[in-house]
Amino acid sequence: QVQLVESGGGLVQAGSSLRLSCVASGRSASNKAMGWFRQAPGKEREFVAAISWNGGEILNEDSVKDRFTVSRDNAKNTLYLQMNSLKPEDTAVYYCASQRGIWPTRSRYDYDSWGQGTQVTVSS
């Protein structure tokens, strides 16, 4: 099992930037694809971005692909989400997750370890 701890959320104004971090620990953390999901109040948890075990393949949700960048540093066992040009509709709790395999997917059901989440609030 992989343990995940997110940080970096906060309250910002529209147009601002934030960088989320997710530190992974546990068995074979660096050998798994990882992803970011988000959940707004009253909505389903949705896919944001994901990255393969070696960073060579990346998937992005269409509404964020020109603004958000997912990356990882396996030497530090850390996953990142750089979020630029934030919009009020980006407000949500952001979760990082570890996949069962090495290649990224969009389905939350493919991820078996989750962090506790970090709140991102964007004011207009």
Image: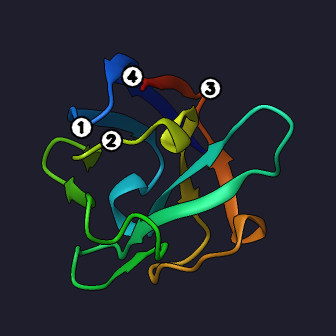
The residue labelled by disc 3 is 116
List x then y, in percent, for residue 99. Answer: 57, 66
Report how far apart the C-alphas of labels 2 and 3 lie in the structure.
Answer: 22 Å
List x then y, in percent, for residue 122. Answer: 43, 26
Q: Amino acid at mark 1?
A: Gly
Q: Secondary structure under badge 1?
A: loop
Report how far apart the C-alphas of labels 1 and 2 lie in the structure.
Answer: 5 Å
Of labels 2 and 3, the one closer to you:
2
The residue labelled by disc 1 is 15
Report how far apart the C-alphas of labels 1 and 3 lie in the structure.
Answer: 26 Å
List x then y, in percent, for residue 89. Answer: 54, 43
**Nearest to N terminus: mark 4 or mark 2:** 4
Of labels 1 and 4, the one closer to you:
1
Relative to residue 5, is residue 30 drawn left or right?
A: left
Relative to 43, residue 23 above or below: above
Pointer 1 and pointer 2: residues touching (CB < 8 Å)?
yes
Of labels 4 and 3, the one closer to you:
4
The residue labelled by disc 4 is 9
**Nearest to N terminus: mark 2 or mark 3:** 2
Answer few, some or many: residues within 10 Å of disc 3's Cα (few below 14, many 20 plus, some between 14 and 19): some
The residue labelled by disc 2 is 86
Q: Amino acid at mark 2?
A: Leu
Residue 78 shows in this picture:
no
Report how far apart the C-alphas of labels 1 and 4 lie in the structure.
Answer: 15 Å
Q: Secondary structure under badge 4?
A: loop
Residue drawn 33% across and 59% down? 30
